[in-house]
Every structure is written in structure tokens, then in C-alpha cells.
Image: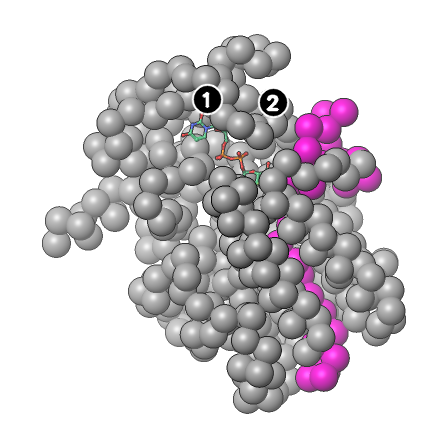
């Protein structure tokens, strides 16, 4: 059985990926410091898959701890590195926290991988590296634009750190996965997104407004150069996204990578506006989302959606879930959280 370390495996995308990895027959070791996740997620994963993943409560900034852990779990085949700080706004307030967390964690892993004979790494990157692309849909060879936030910059710099390290190493391989906007939850409603405090992202804010936790959703701007004036994104189902990691992992472990660093966009290829998302959410779930138009949010990109052709053809992965089912899953998850609050 191939052994995979998943850093940030108790987090939103991480937990869904652990489920798919276990269901595909991989043995998983989660490393997570629970800074933005809960330990109950491990039980949720166990309930879905029937397997409790190994769980190590550790911060990837802890070099000595990581070294010990890799010694303990000898024979790891690959690492999927999710663990990172991800709030754009917070990164503007606390840039050094973001640079330290996101860069040093990655550097620790890259430094320890050869020491423990680990050759493969999958890295969580973001479409944020493209900024506002000149051409849409955006493909992997589009220019990297100056980052709009320290968070965005950490993703760009992490990609560079990986490229430089692999250039020097020769025997290591990396796959950089650039996510568009992951949303929704596992169909079992046993795992999903657990935002800390007031959600920054659109869909958790919608579900919390629909359930009554928030009074009203603010739509940030309706004066953009888009058909209805609100921003456009490529919203991708989190389970689809998780499955792409399994496909990428198999490609690496089967030695099918054509280059030492491969890059893939993970999106649907379809752009939807904020107002369209609200509309579809209300229709498919039969629930109202009180909302009002307010001014633009600083740093927002007007429109971005993926050209996923390379992931489709080369990786052999395609997003298949409909936006309707995805928004249904987000609502089912929010209702499940509400039931737990009542208990
Ligand atoms: N939005 C609202 N109201 C809200 C929240 C969001 O109108 O309360 C709008 C935003 O203005 C944007 C869209 O919904 O137009 C999506 O916003 P999100 O915050 O959900 O997602 P972003 O596209 O801004 O950010 C996401 C990730 C980041 C990543 C970025 C890359 O959350 O980590 O994509 O573009 F950097």
C-alpha cells in the first residue's frame, strides 16, 4: 500500500482529499496543527471511508518534530502539502505570519524529503497567481501577475521555491495544482467547510445567511465589466477537486510525469457571477438569501475562469459535478452544522 502524508489533512480541501485517497487504496498520514480545523474531522473521514487515518498534531514549522515524524512513519511515497494560512485579508494585516507559515513549512518539507527518501510532492497552489488574466479562459502558460496580497505572493514564491529545489535535486518530482474556487461539501455531509468566525468566502457566507447566522449577504460590487455587473469566478466542487489529487498522485507514482514540475489548472472552465450563484442557490434549495449590493471589495479580480484542457487531457481528470448539486451539498452541510449546534 502506498503511503501518503497529507499536511493540512483536517482542513477543508485536505479532508475531502484524504477521503478520496483512502477510497483509492492509499494509506494516509495526516499532519495538522488544527489551527483552522477541528479534530472531529478525523472521525468524519473514518465514518465515510471505514478507515481512521493516522493523525499527527504537528505544525509544519516544527522542523525537528517533522524530522522525527518522518522517521517514525518510514517509507512515505509522497506528500500532499495543503497546510497553509489562506485568508487574503488577514495576510494584508499580518504579512510576516503568512510568509513564515506558508514559506517555512514548505521549505522544511522540501529539505526533509531527500533525508527520508521521499521523492514526490503535490502542492496546493491557486489561480490567484494569474491575477486578472489578459485572456480568458486562463491556461497554465498565462503570465504570472504581481500578487495582490501577501497570501497570493506566498503561493507564487512557493511555486518558485519548488521549481528551484527540483532544478537542483534531479530525483524529485512535483505537481503544482492551481485551484479555482472550491465550494460545496461531501455528499454524506460528514465533512465540509468549517470557516473560522465570519466567512470571507462567498458560499459559506451564503449558507450562513440562509440559515440565519448572518443577517444579510453583501454583494461586493455590481459595476464590473461583466454581464450582470458582479464578479465572475470558476466554482469547483470540492470532491471533484479532491479527486484530481488522487489522479495526480497516481500519475507521479506511476512515473508518468513528463517534467519534474508539472502544473495543472483545476477548474470547470465555466464562469459564474456572484448574482448567478445566489440565484442558483436560492432556486435549488428553495431558500431565501437576503442580500444587498455594496461597494467593491479591495483587491477583487473582476473575472477569472479556467481553461482546464491540460488537466482534462494530460492528467485525465475532469470536473463532473453540476453547480446545482454542489450548491445543494453546501446547504445540506450547513443544515447539518445547525443540527449539531442545537444538540
Ligand atoms: N463575495 C461577495 N460577498 C461576500 C464574499 C464574496 O460578494 O461576502 C464575492 C467576491 O467579491 C468575489 C466572489 O464573491 O467576487 C468570490 O469571492 P471569494 O472570497 O469566495 O473567493 P475569491 O475568488 O475572492 O478568493 C478565492 C480564494 C483565495 C484565492 C482567490 C484567487 O478564497 O484563497 O480565490 O483568486 F486567493
Q: Residue 260 is drawn in which quadrant?
A: bottom right
Number of numbered tags placed on the structure image: 2
Instruction: Determine whether the beta carbon of the residue marked 2 sits less than 8 angstroms from the nearest atom of ligand 1.
Output: no
Q: In the rendering, which numbered label is found on residue 302?
A: 2
The residue at the point 68 percent across, 33 percent down is: 131
Asked if residue 139 lies in the magenta stretch, the reply is yes
- Horizontal side of residue 268 vs 157, given as left or right: left
Crowding at mark 1 (Cα within 10 Å: few <14, some 14-19, many 20+):
some
Taking the spot 31% from the left edge, 29% from the top edge, the residue there is: 285
Q: Is residue 103 above or below residue 149?
A: below
Q: Position of residue 227 (x, y in %)?
A: 57, 10
Q: N-terminal of the two: label 2 or label 1?
A: 1
Q: Is residue 276 above or below residue 68?
A: above
**Location of residue 148 (image quadrant):** top right
Residue at screen point 59% across, 61% down: 100
Residue 105 seen in render: yes
SS at mark 2 in the image: loop
Stretch of the chain drawn in magenta: 113-142
Q: Which mark is residue 220?
A: 1
Percent of width and height locating residue 24? 55, 65
Amino acid at each position: 500500500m502506498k503511503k501518503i502524508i497529507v499536511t493540512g489533512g483536517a482542513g477543508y480541501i485536505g479532508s475531502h482529499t484524504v477521503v478520496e485517497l483512502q477510497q483509492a487504496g492509499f494509506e494516509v498520514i495526516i499532519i495538522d496543527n488544527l489551527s483552522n480545523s477541528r479534530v472531529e474531522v478525523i472521525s468524519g473521514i473514518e465514518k465515510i471511508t471505514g478507515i481512521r487515518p493516522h493523525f499527527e498534531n504537528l505544525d509544519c514549522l516544527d522542523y525537528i518534530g517533522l524530522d522525527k515524524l518522518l522517521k517514525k512513519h518510514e517509507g512515505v511515497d509522497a506528500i500532499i502539502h495543503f497546510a497553509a494560512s489562506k485568508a487574503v485579508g488577514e495576510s494584508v494585516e499580518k504579512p510576516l505570519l503568512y510568509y513564515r507559515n506558508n514559506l517555512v513549512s514548505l521549505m522544511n518539507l522540501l529539505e526533509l524529503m531527500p533525508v527520508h527518501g521521499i521523492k514526490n510532492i503535490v502542492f496546493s497552489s491557486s489561480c490567484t497567481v494569474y491575477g486578472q488574466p489578459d485572456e480568458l479562459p486562463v491556461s497554465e502558460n498565462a503570465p504570472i501577475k504581481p500578487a495582490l496580497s501577501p497570501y497570493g505572493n506566498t503561493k507564487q514564491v512557493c511555486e518558485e521555491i519548488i521549481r528551484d529545489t527540483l532544478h537542483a535535486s534531479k530525483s524529485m518530482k512535483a505537481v503544482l495544482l492551481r485551484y479555482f474556487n472550491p465550494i460545496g461539501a461531501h455528499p454524506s455531509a460528514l465533512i465540509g467547510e468549517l470557516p473560522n468566525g465570519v466567512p470571507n468566502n462567498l458560499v459559506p457566507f451564503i449558507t450562513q445567511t440562509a440559515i440565519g447566522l448572518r443577517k444579510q449577504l453583501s454583494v461586493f460590487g455590481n459595476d464590473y465589466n461583466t454581464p450582470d455587473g458582479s464578479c465572475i469566478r470558476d466554482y469547483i466542487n470540492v470532491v471533484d477537486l479532491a479527486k484530481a489529487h488522487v489522479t495526480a498522485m497516481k500519475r507521479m507514482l506511476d512515473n508518468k510525469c513528463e517534467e519534474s514540475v508539472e502544473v495543472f489548472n483545476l477548474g470547470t472552465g465555466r464562469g459564474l457571477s456572484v448574482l448567478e450563484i445566489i440565484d442558483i442557490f436560492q432556486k435549488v434549495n428553495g431558500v431565501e438569501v437576503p442580500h444587498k449590493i455594496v461597494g467593491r471589495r479591495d483587491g477583487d479580480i473582476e473575472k477569472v475562469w479556467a481553461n482546464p484542457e491540460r488537466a482534462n487531457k494530460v492528467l485525465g481528470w475532469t470536473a463532473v459535478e453540476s453547480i446545482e448539486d454542489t450548491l445543494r451539498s453546501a446547504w445540506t452541510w450547513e443544515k447539518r452544522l445547525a443540527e449539531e449546534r442545537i444538540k
